[in-house]
Amino acid sequence: MKARYVRISTASQKIERQLIKNHPNEKLFVDISSGAIAFNKREKAKELLGQIKNNEVKYVSVHSIDRLGRNLYDILYTLETFEKFEVILKVDNLGLESHIAGKPNFAFKLIISVMGSIAEMERETLLERQREGITIAKINGVYKGRLKGSKESKSQFLLKHKNTIKYLNQNHSLRNVAKLCNISLSTVQKVKELYSKNDITKGL
C-alpha cells in the first residue's frame, strides 16, 4: 500500500479533501503539528509507523523533507526506520526516491542530509531572530512580556490565549488544541479551567 504523509502547522478543513482528490491511490496521514516535534511523537506519524512495521505500507510520499521534521537527527532517524522496513520514500519537490531499481539511492541520502541541515538552520535562525527582537524590545522599553516577580491575573492570562479559547469552543480535543496553538497540554488545561470559571472573557 502507498501512503502520503502531510504535516501542517495549523488546521485547514479543506486540505484533506483536496489531497484525496489529487492522490486517490494513497492513504493519507495528516498531522497538525510543529516541525520541531519528533516524527515518532506525532499522532498520525505514529499510526503510519505502526502500519509500516506491520508491512502494510511499503511506499511513502511527502511534499518536502521538512514535513518529516526540522531536526536533521530526527529526519535521518526516520529515514533509517523506513530503510529497516524496506519502505521507499519519495520527496515530491526534489523528484527523488530513496531506492532505484530495488537498490538504495545514495544520492538521495546525501541530498536529504543537505536539505535537512538547511531546514534545521532555518529554524535556528528564526529562533535567534525572535530572541534578538525580544532583547531589542527590552532595551527600547517596549517589551510586553510580564515583568519578573509580577503576578498575572486570570483575565490577562486568558487574553493571551484567545486562539486556545476559540478552538476549545469548537470542541477540539485538548491535545489537538495544544498542537494548533503550539503550547503545552498543561497550558490548554489551565485555559479551559479558568475560562469555564471566568465570565469576563466569555465574549472572546
Image (cartoon, grey):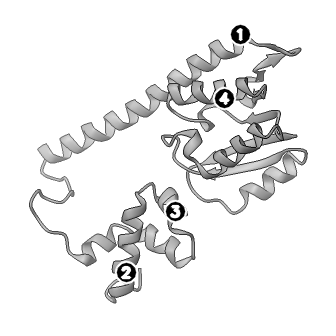
Task: From the image, tell me which residue sits under label 4.
Answer: 81
Q: Residue at (79%, 40%) from the top-left corner?
A: 54
Q: Label 4 crowding class (10 Å Cα cut-off): few <14, some 14-19, many 20+?
A: some
Task: From the image, tell me which residue sits under label 1.
Answer: 106
In-image side of 23 versus 31 (left or right): right
Q: Residue at (39%, 31%) from the top-left corner?
A: 124
Task: From the image, tell me which residue sits under label 2.
Answer: 195
Label 1: element kind: helix
In the rendered structure, which disc, 4 or 1, sits on the residue that comes first in sequence?
A: 4
Residue in the foreground of this view, choosing between 201 and 67: 67
How far apart are labels 3 and 4 at the CA level? 26 Å
Image location of residue 25, percent across then percent down = 90, 45
Q: Residue at (86%, 52%) from the top-left corner?
A: 21
How far apart are labels 1 and 3 at the CA level? 38 Å
Q: Foreground mark, 2 or 4?
A: 4
Note whether 192 is above or below 54 in the view shown. Answer: below
Q: Quadrant of residue 66?
A: top right
In the rendered structure, which disc, 2 or 3, sits on the residue that comes first in sequence?
A: 3
Task: From the image, tell me which residue sits under label 3.
Answer: 175
For the residues bearing labels 4 and 1, Cβ distance under 8 angstroms: no
Q: Quadrant of the N terminus?
A: top right
Q: Label 3 crowding class (10 Å Cα cut-off): few <14, some 14-19, many 20+?
A: some
In the rendered structure, which disc, 3 or 4, sits on the residue that comes first in sequence?
A: 4
How far apart are labels 2 and 3 at the CA level? 17 Å
**What's under tag 4, amino acid-wise?**
Thr
